[in-house]
Amino acid sequence: MNFAEHAAKPLLHAAGIEIPRAALAVNEEEAAAIAARLGACVIKAQVPTGKRGKAGGIQLAASVDAARAAARRILGMTIAGERVERVLVEEQVPIAAEMYAAVVSDATSKGPLVLYSARGGMDIEEIAHSHPEALARIAVDIRFGPDHALFARALPAILPCESKPLVALLARLFQVYAANDAELVEINPLAVARDGRLIALDCKLSVDDSAIPRQPALLRSAAPDRLTLLEARGKALALKYIELEGEVGVLANGAGLAMTTMDAVRHYGGRPANFLEIGGESYTKAKPALELVLANGRVKCLLVNFCGAFARTDVMIAGVISAWEELKPKIPLFFTIHGTNEDAAIAMVRERLRLEPFDRMDEAVEAAVAAAKGGSP
């Protein structure tokens, strides 16, 4: 789940992190009325994506008329595929310095990682690439939570603010991360006001979808998923489907296997057309899954990769074969099958489809990529 700024900032405020006064507006007159109360303000597009400023979605307004005009320009914009339907009208904060702070789920340390930089307002990727020494990385043991002394030691020797309140803010930011099952909570910029206060001028929040049952209140304020027509169709079918821009259709019986197959397609010079993890339900859902993949007009071949442990490959393959026989697609089909009852599954493919499954996934992928490019499979 991703959250627009206006939905993420209240979580910071509840944790004791200061945020500017602000209110939402859905039209230019509402924006003007809010600006009349706040004075000099910032008009900010509310979409769950970054780089709003570069797209013109964040504009300063020194007067009510300027706020009205800025809202008029921003409302209706499309930023990274998201249409702007609301703006946040926020008071301007006199800024002495801008910093960066975040907590992320880190694959390398296998736990939470607190990030801090005195170079705020920039893309974190740019900071990490061009000035790696400017980004402090502090791994946190999830069992014990933040260590204030460790934070203090990890921060740069020269800071644009007092160390103690910054350490306290990082600890509070970690609590926001932990309490909300977040994958990322980021403040950029974290402002040092001219009077010394630390104020979160923006907030990006991403929460693990698996935590939805634990976070019902958050679900109500999450940004709606931006789905393609096929992705919406997949969601209605309770299928894990993501539409991509390639030509090789992919059907696998596990999320990790599907991702590995997609990586292999890219490795051998092809482009996957979709992610589709069907699991052990391929016997009952093979037909709608196959229809979904084939509904993408870019698909030039289908690669089926099944690896059964608890799930029987012969049962899964039977579902796919029956769907293929019924739908009769006119594209090349490639199989790689391993695991429980693989011999029976392979025999079924040979007998009913007159195809020879590949023994190695790489061989199947290379053949599928060649077929998608118009060569011999």
Image (cartoon, rainbow, N blue to C red):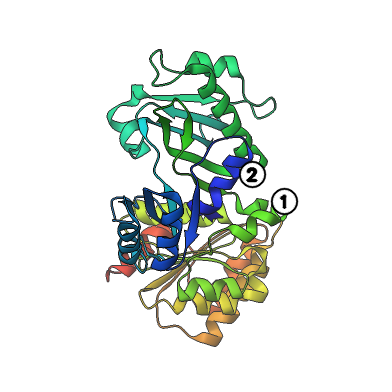
Q: Which residue is mark 1?
A: 214
Q: Nearer the viewer, residue 245 or 34?
A: 34
Q: Residue 227 appears at what percent x and percent y?
A: 48, 69
**In the shown orientation, is residue 280 left or right of residue 113?**
right
Question: In the picture, which quadrant includes the C terminus?
Answer: bottom left
Residue located at (54% from left, 25% from top): 139
Q: Is residue 362 visible?
A: no
Above or below: residue 61 compared with residue 224: above
Residue located at (30% from left, 26% from top): 131
Q: Residue 77 appears at what percent x and percent y?
A: 33, 66
Residue located at (59% from left, 18% from top): 148
Above or below: residue 306 compared with residue 111: below
Q: Nearer the viewer, residue 37 or 235?
A: 37
Tell me which label, 2 or 1, sits earlier in the chain: 2
Q: Nearer the viewer, residue 145 or 122?
A: 122
Q: Residue 137 appears at what percent x and percent y?
A: 47, 25
| Marks 2,1: beta carbons within 8 A | yes
The quarter of the picture where residue 182 lies is top right
Q: Amino acid at mark 1?
A: Arg
- Classify mark 1: residues with Cα within 10 Å, few (<14), some (14-19) or many (20+): few
Q: How far apart, in angstroms, are the residues tagged by discs 2 and 1?
A: 8 Å
Q: Amino acid at mark 2?
A: Asp
Question: In the picture, which quadrant includes the N terminus?
Answer: bottom right
Q: Secondary structure at mark 2?
A: loop
Q: Is residue 141 visible?
A: yes
- Classify mark 2: residues with Cα within 10 Å, few (<14), some (14-19) or many (20+): some
Q: Secondary structure at mark 1?
A: helix
Total marks in image:
2
Residue located at (64% from left, 44% from top): 181
Q: Which residue is mark 2?
A: 181
Q: Which mark is residue 85?
A: none
